[in-house]
Amino acid sequence: MSFTRPTDPYESVLNLRVVRKYLPQPVSAGDAAAILEAGRWTGSAKNRQDWAFLIVDDPDQQAQLAGCGQFSQPLRDAGLVIVPVRLPGGYEFDIGRVAQNMMLAAVTRGVGSCPVTLHDEGCAAEVLRLPPDHQARYALCFGYPDDDAELEQRASRSMSGRKPLDRLIVRNRY
C-alpha cells in the first residue's frame, strides 16, 4: 500500500481515508501553513468564522489531550495536532466543515489525518486552558503516513467500505 496523493478535488473527496500511523517527524511549516489556510478559507454561517485554530505540537501536551478522549492514540503520535475551537455563537456544523477542509488539504500535500473526539470536554477545556465560553470537542491529527504500519493496521481490521448509494437515498419523505 502506498499513500495516494490526489490532486483532483473530487478524487480527494472520494479517496480521503483516516490515517492513524505516522512517521516520527513533525509536519513541515509549509504543509502546516497550507492546512491552516484551508481551514481559514472554509465557509461558515453568515461568514462569521466563529473559530480559532489551537496548535498542539508539544508531545507532553498532546499526551495530556489524548487523556480527554477515547481511541486517542493518534493524538500522541501525530506530527501536528490542530484543535478547532468553537467560539461563542459558533456552530458545530461549521467546525465539521473546517475539519473536512483541513483534512482534504492535507491529503493533497501527502499528509495523513485523523479526527479524534474529545469525549471529556471539561478535560479538554482544562488541558487547553480554554475560556469558559469556548468549546473544543474535536482534535485533528496530522502526520506523514507510515505506509507499512497503516497497511498492517488495515489488514487486521475488517473494513466494510461504503454502503451502496441506493441504501442511503430517501426521496421527499422518510
Image (cartoon, rainbow, N blue to C red):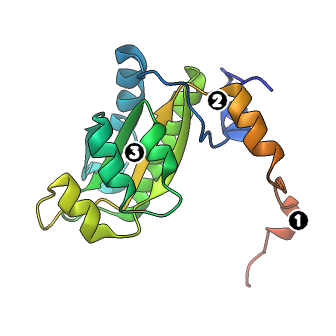
Give whichever of 116, 153 is nearer the camera.
Answer: 153
Q: CA distance from mark 2 to mark 1?
A: 24 Å
The image quarter containing residue 15 is: top right
- The residue shown at (38%, 14%) is 30
Q: Position of residue 64 (x, y in %)?
A: 30, 52
- The residue shown at (11%, 60%) is 131
- The residue shown at (30%, 33%) is 57
Q: Which residue is mark 3?
A: 43
Give whichever of 6, 27 is nearer the camera.
Answer: 27
Q: Amino acid at mark 1?
A: Asp
The image quarter containing residue 80 is: top left
Label annotation for residue 166: 1
Query: Dot 3, how many residues are within 10 Å of its Cα: few (below 14), some (14-19), or many (20+)?
Result: some
Vertical order, 69 against 171 (above or below): above
Q: CA distance from mark 2 to mark 3?
A: 17 Å
Q: How many labels, in total?
A: 3
Of marks 2 and 3, which one's residue comes earlier in the chain?
Answer: 2
Q: Which residue is mark 2?
A: 9
Q: Secondary structure at mark 2?
A: helix
Examine the rendering and report whether any part of residue 144 can be seen: yes
Examine the rendering and report whether any part of residue 102 can be seen: no
